[in-house]
């Protein structure tokens, strides 16, 4: 049975890639959308939560991006073992990066601090990670600009030992995070604040990327910790307490993953073109994710890449599609940039809020949408 399922997934993957290439890597082309820069209260091209959904995207023939006949090498660093890494391999297997003429070098690191250090040392072209650390680094003399969203919404759940049944039970307990100042740390502090708890009410333990946090909770090494909602089925099977699987709604003005670049690269025409082509491929990958015909292929890629249970990834696929997690228009909002900085103030990572233009720009996002069109999320 398992062999039949795997074979079916491989056939689906090959069919999907062939169909995708027949429309020259364009994916889904939107009709009649607006607001994709994220300047309003909603998440870019998606309506704000609770508002009516826009019409579904339509499939239309389109060419690969201008200049894609000349290949470019792009190096991107991100956080290891988190589910979004599946997107890179998924896009490669569909031929999306190839259609854009992008030779992608993906570097997986142990977290936000390493990403910031590597960007400062020009070790890679883009970083795909949390927002708090690079904004704090900008206040200390660094220079980064957020250019595109990766995951448009928060994807955490709060897991805890079985005996911890209420948020107030966390007082005095050991709570796992990636590192001090990381996105999981900021999200945890913001979430606790919603329940009238302060950061000083718990003991934080730095453990590395959130999959490591989940494994530490599972092993009883810490009392609680945030990790991706993709671990929710496993947590329930193992009898862990789930203090919240609604952090996506409890922290509406927070964003966990986005792409950031160096301003000097944005001012360089050749480098800017490389970044636009990579981000075009990333947006097309997200659009391919939202096509239900690609569900089995995405699950097959993730199960093999990260040694995950297919059923767990199937649950997560449905959740992510419903919540519009992946930023198909590379959207992020001014409110999210503000929200991240306000949590940094709580952490003590920064002493003032920087203007939006000092830490982010919509320039590359607009360039991508001019190139590939805007995506309309289906209901």
Image (spheres, grey):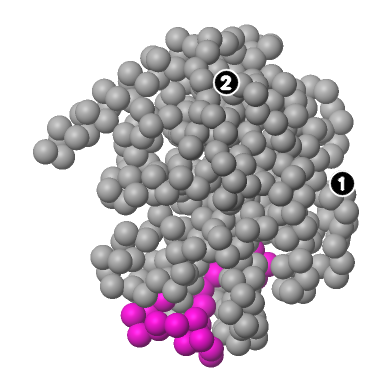
Residue 159 drawn above or below residue 144: below
Q: Residue 76: horizontal and vertical position, in percent? A: 62, 38
Residue nearest the observer in this picture, 228 or 321: 321
Q: Is residue 5 left or right of residue 304?
A: left
Magenta segment boundaries in residue numbering: 160-182
- Residue depicted at x 65% and y 24%: 32
Point out the image quarter for the N terminus. top left
Mark 2, mark 1: which one is toward the viewer?
2
Residue 195 on the magenta span: no
Q: Which mark is residue 29?
A: 2
Image location (x, y in percent) of residue 102:
60, 22
- Circle 1 sits on which residue? 357
Percent across and percent down for residue 253 are 67, 58
Q: Residue furthest front?
A: 52
Question: How packed is label 2: few (under 14 Cα within 10 Å), some, or many (20 or more)?
Answer: some
Task: Give the residue at x 38% y 14%.
Answer: 18
Q: Residue furthest left?
A: 1
Residue 124 placement: quadrant: top right
Q: Quadrant of residue 374?
A: top right
SS label for mark 2:
strand
Determine whether 287 is above or below 40 in the image. Answer: above
The rendered magenta stretch, by its main secondary structure, is classed as loop
């Amino acid at each position: 049975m398992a062999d039949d399922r795997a074979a079916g997934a491989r056939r689906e993957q090959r069919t999907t890639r062939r169909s995708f290439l027949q429309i020259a890597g364009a994916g889904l082309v939107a009709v009649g959308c607006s607001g994709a820069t994220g300047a309003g209260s909603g998440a870019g091209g998606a309506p704000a939560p609770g508002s009516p959904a826009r019409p579904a995207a339509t499939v239309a023939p389109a060419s690969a991006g201008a200049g894609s006949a000349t290949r470019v090498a792009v190096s991107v660093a991100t956080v290891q073992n988190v589910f979004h890494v599946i997107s890179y391999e998924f896009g490669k297997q569909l031929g999306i990066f190839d259609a854009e003429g992008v030779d992608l070098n993906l570097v997986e690191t142990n977290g936000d601090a390493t990403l910031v250090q590597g960007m400062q040392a020009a070790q890679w072209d883009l970083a795909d990670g949390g927002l708090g650390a690079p904004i704090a680094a900008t206040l200390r003399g660094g220079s980064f600009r957020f250019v595109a969203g990766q995951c448009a919404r928060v994807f955490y759940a709060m897991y805890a030992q079985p005996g911890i049944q209420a948020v107030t039970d966390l007082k005095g307990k050991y709570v796992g995070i990636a590192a001090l100042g990381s996105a999981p740390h900021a999200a945890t502090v913001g979430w606790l604040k919603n329940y009238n708890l302060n950061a000083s009410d718990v003991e934080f333990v730095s453990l590395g990327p959130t999959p490591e946090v989940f494994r530490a909770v599972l092993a009883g090494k810490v009392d609680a910790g945030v990790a991706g909602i993709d671990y929710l089925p496993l947590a329930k099977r193992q009898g862990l307490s789930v203090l919240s699987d609604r952090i996506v709604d409890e922290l509406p003005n927070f964003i966990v993953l986005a792409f950031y670049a160096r301003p000097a690269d944005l001012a360089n025409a050749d480098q800017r073109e490389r970044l636009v082509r990579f981000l075009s491929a990333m947006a097309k990958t997200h659009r391919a994710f939202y096509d239900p015909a690609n569900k089995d292929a995405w699950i097959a890629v993730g199960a093999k890449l990260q040694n995950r249970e297919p059923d767990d990834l199937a649950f997560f696929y449905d959740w992510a599609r419903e919540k519009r997690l992946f930023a198909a228009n590379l959207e992020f909002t001014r409110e999210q940039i503000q929200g991240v900085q306000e949590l940094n103030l709580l952490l003590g990572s920064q002493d003032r809020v920087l203007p939006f233009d000092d830490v982010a720009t919509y320039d590359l996002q607009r360039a991508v949408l001019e190139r590939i069109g805007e995506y309309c999320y289906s209901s």
